[in-house]
Image (cartoon, rainbow, N blue to C red):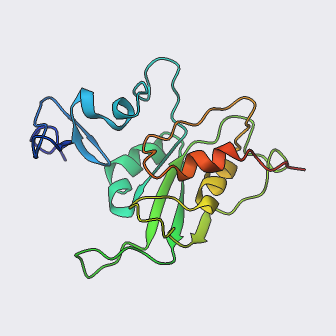
Amino acid sequence: MTTPDTGCEHWLGPLGAPCGARPTRRYLTGRCCPQHTPAALAGHPEPGQAAYQLRGLAGASQATSGLLDARAIASGARRSGREKLRPVPTGSRITPAWEAILYVVPAGRSARGTGPDVSNVLRCRIPDVGFVGAKPPAWTRWVLDLLGYEADSDSVDDLFPGSGSVGRELAQGVMPFG
């Protein structure tokens, strides 16, 4: 299903209005022009360009279902989920109590013994840090374990670094395995 290009939805605070530029692509955050994609705002190249390789994506359950989910799974991605033990209330009567994670395990890192055994479901509380979307420390560790993260050869780009929680966990280093 194709939706009409209604313009970039990135909010321009000083103007008190969305950007509105076209053309746009659909992202988990809404429609964005090339200047306001999550990668552009974080100062990174777009996934799929240059040597950048996207290995994981997290988002609200309704955002990662549908076309994005179907295409990712068809391409060999795996799906896991986080159950939010204290979900943030919304304007809906249906509480979004889980978050989908789409990821690709690099070659050679999925067999038993190549990293820690990890469940495809994480149950953890939402951190009480006053920042919507902040990830709990357990979430960052869990995603790194799902990916078979190797600190000496892998890099992590947090496209939404607002709360700083992912960066704080990465700064602590990785627990040794084995």
Residue 87 in view of the camera = yes
Looking at the image, residue 154 sits to the left or right of residue 31; the answer is right
Residue in the picture at 85% in, 48% down: 176
Residue 66: % across, % down:
33, 55
Farthest residue in the bottom direction?
Answer: 93
Task: Pick whichever, 54 or 109, lies toward us.
Answer: 54
Q: In the rendered image, which quarter is residue 33 located in? A: top left
Residue in the picture at 14% in, 41% down: 14
Residue 50: % across, % down:
47, 17
Farthest residue in the front direction?
Answer: 14
Q: Is the residue 39 above or below the residue 97 in the image?
A: above
Q: Is the residue 138 above or below the residue 154 in the image?
A: below
Q: Is the residue 168 above or below the residue 84 in the image?
A: above
Farthest residue in the right direction?
Answer: 178
Task: Pick whichever, 105 or 88, lies toward us.
Answer: 88
Residue 147 in view of the camera = no
Q: Is the residue 100 above or below the residue 96 in the image?
A: above
Instruction: Count the labels in the image.
Output: 0
Residue 83: % across, % down:
52, 71
Looking at the image, residue 176 sits to the left or right of residue 119; the answer is right
Q: In the rendered image, which quarter is residue 142 located in? A: bottom right
Residue in the picture at 67% in, 32% down: 154
Residue 162: % across, % down:
42, 48
Residue in the picture at 41% in, 55% down: 59
